[in-house]
Image: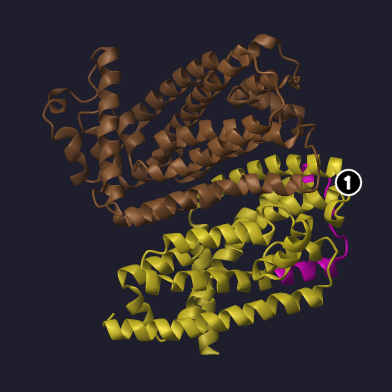
Chain colours: A brown, B yellow
Amino acid sequence: MGGSRDRTDGGDSRTDGCGAAGSGSGGSRPVDGRGTGGNRPAGGPGSGGSRVADGLRAYRLIAGMWLRSTMAYRASFIMTTIGNFAVTALDFVAILLMFSRVDALGGYTLPEIAFLYGLSGVSFGLADLAIGSMDRLGRRVRDGTLDTLLVRPAPVLAQIAADRFALRRLGRVTQGALVLGYAFATLDVHWTALKVLLVPVMVVSGWAIFCAVFVAGAAFQFAAQDASEVQNAFTYGGTTLLQYPPTVFAKELVRGVTFVLPLAFVNWLPATYVLGRPYPLGLPRWTAFASPLVAAVCCALAGLAWRAGLRSYRSTGS
Amino acid sequence: MGAGRLYAAVAAGGFRRYATYRAATAAGVFTNTVFGLILVYTYLALWDVRPHLGGYDRAQAVTYVWLGQALLSTLAIGGGGVEDELMERIRTGDIAVDLYRPADLQLWWLAADVGRAMFQMLGRGVVPFLFGALFFPVALPTDPVTWAAFVGTVLSAMLVSFALRFLVALSAFWLLDGTGMVQMASLAGIFCSGMLLPLNVFPGALGEVVRVLPWSSLLQAPADVLLGRADPLGTYAFQLAWAVALLALGRLLQTLATRRVVVQGG
């Protein structure tokens, strides 16, 4: 654990070598080679709807390109996916080891913690899969390759989000899903329709909140560059935090992740409602259902931060 | 004499090289502190339920967490030392240049890694540890002899850590792409060193087995000496025995591997 992103994503730098499509000029072909996209002015005003459609299309094309490049080395893909799964599973092994010695942690039983763990793992894993490579932005700013993205007729956010799309990150999602499955099988919860509905809502909102953290982190890298590791404290650190029940942590820390960086809305608040447990801060019941709203606000703020970051960008000029 | 100066210069170069990236170091310190904060609360919750788990009291468990954060990058427990660069050089063939140098390959990279470890310890390890000592109840020895013994175990751990990662790096001579090996080594490092949970908390036979593996020299051994739970001399013997065995194995593999390079024509 601890600084554990090193091990989690160690594959990134090494896969560079086999990224046959490269991220330089060759990589741009699927995006601007189609002609249609090429006619639109880069970063032009355009209507909001078409920009989003543009972005999604660019994302799909670039991610597809990386997917094809990954599949050229199938054995390597399978091994790194298994590795991704195993590395993530270590966190749960730690919890299992703890439960070989105790029956409850912070007053929560193993199935209850598995429920929190699974939700945290799946929603973070999906965000990591979708846009996890954004933490490479600092490197692109430093070596000047961000300029290539700026002149392409596609939204920069979509390009950087799809950059080095790594399907092996499904390993993390799968691991989280398995633990969540174990939780469903063993939890002693009186499931109402509302509680059942809350589960997919949590996964989607949690995904959006973590995506917002990734985007805000990338925006921060316009300023920080070398300091990209700070982001890991909030992404990988955030998901690790949420794997454990809120009762374990100091009140100030819980307040921080509820009101300042609202990670608590990924799983803690809704999950404590599902489990019929009180939330340590004694918030009103309706907050358990506020996750989608919080996620929307987070995404909007992250979008603003991204714009501010991109505007402040000055090329290295070489 | 001359050789000693050469390797000292390589080590100093390794130190300076890592010292150059100050923002990255500050970011690392921040991240290690945040992870330490998360871990320390989970440990405290565990020790609340079982106050003397693994023979540690609460303060000792807290100390263990912050020591782990201090040593994680110092000893490259999850990987991330000089082996990444060495593997890349083997893959690209640059290793041929290294082999031409009038210096020993293993000692050269050992010196570079010790320089790196020294910087990571001072630049990246000390601050999270001080943060932990300041804001949480820790159990630190008051007598300087224990501290000196502890520093000795960290230095020996540097040898074991490098010896293990050198073996991983040499695998690239046969595999070319060492991603899989790096990943497995990282898993073994995190699990068997006690980074996940102190090894004395591991249940039954599993606990006995991991304690005799080389990885226990990395975190468990220095921690037990610092917490006054292990005899320093016995700990040194254990660590150095593994260091010698693994370095000798590395030397053997290096001989086999370099022969192979020559056969291929570099």
Label 1 sits on what residue type? Pro
* Whether residue A78 is visible: yes
- Residue at the spot 40% in from the left edge and 34% down from the top edge: A130
Using the image as rendered, state which of residue B24 and residue A100 is in the foreground.
A100
Q: Answer above or below: position of B18 versus A42.
A: below
For the C terminus of chain B, the quadrant is bottom left
Using the image as rendered, state which of residue A188 and residue B251 is in the foreground.
A188
As drawn, is B239 to the left or to the right of A153?
right
- Magenta stretch, main secondary structure, is helix
Q: Is residue B147 magenta?
A: yes
Residue A267 position by quadrant? top right
For the N terminus of chain B, the quadrant is bottom right
Spot occupied by residue B126 in the image (x, y as percentages of width and height): 68, 55
Indicate the chain on which mark 1 is placed.
B
User: What is the magenta range?
Assistant: B134-153
The kind of secondary structure element at disc 1 is loop
Q: Is residue B140 magenta?
A: yes
Q: Which residue is mark 1?
A: B51
